[in-house]
Amino acid sequence: MSIVVFGFAAVAAAALPSYGQDAMESQVSARLSKAISVSSSTVKPNTIVKGKVAYSGIAVSAFKTDNPVQLFNPYAPARYGAALDNALSDPATGRARAWKVFSLQF
């Protein structure tokens, strides 16, 4: 009985594909490049991009949205953006310190 179990285990182990380090690295790099391309192509709800200039902030969010009251609603749907999208945080503590009313990025 143990010989039969050992035989099945040997056949199952031989049937499993063996992935080398190169295959694993190529899979990880493919997933990373896909994630980078998806994240770079999506525009946040509080951002307007024109050429190489990006406008963002509370004023832009209010301009883009169909219902500006939802910007104050803590239970608003995700399409209105996250609460901390328009907040500036302190680099030392990570806590929100100010609101971003209007911002330009080049």
Image: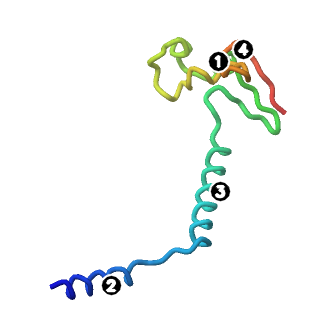
Query: Which of the two marks, 2 or 1, is nearer to us in this view?
Result: 2
Res. 25 image quadrant: bottom right
Mark 3 → mark 4, Cα distance in angstroms: 33 Å
Residue 4 in the image, given as x and y percentages of width and height: 20, 87
Residue at mark 3: 33
Which residue is most to the right?
106
- Provide the residue designation for mark 4: 101
Q: Which residue is mark 2?
A: 10
Q: Position of residue 16 (x, y in %)?
A: 39, 78
Sequence-earlier tag: 1 or 4? 1
Q: Nearer the viewer, residue 96 or 101?
A: 96
Upstream in the sequence, badge 3 or badge 4?
Answer: 3
Is 72 located above or below residue 36 in the figure? above
From the image, state whether disc 2 or disc 4 is nearer to you: 2
Quadrant into which the N terminus falls: bottom left
- Choose between 85 and 63: the one closer to the eye: 85
SS label for mark 4: loop
Q: Percent from the top left, x then y, of residue 99?
A: 69, 13
Q: Nearer the viewer, mark 3 or mark 2?
A: 2
Identify the residue at image location x=77%, y=22%: 103
Local SS, label 1: loop
Pointers 1 and 4 in contact (C-beta within 8 Å): no
At x 54%, y 24%, the residue is 80
> Mark 1 or 3, which is nearer the eye?
1
Q: Secondary structure at mark 3?
A: helix
Residue 10, compared with residue 19, is above or below; it is: below
Q: List x then y, in percent, for residue 32.
A: 62, 55
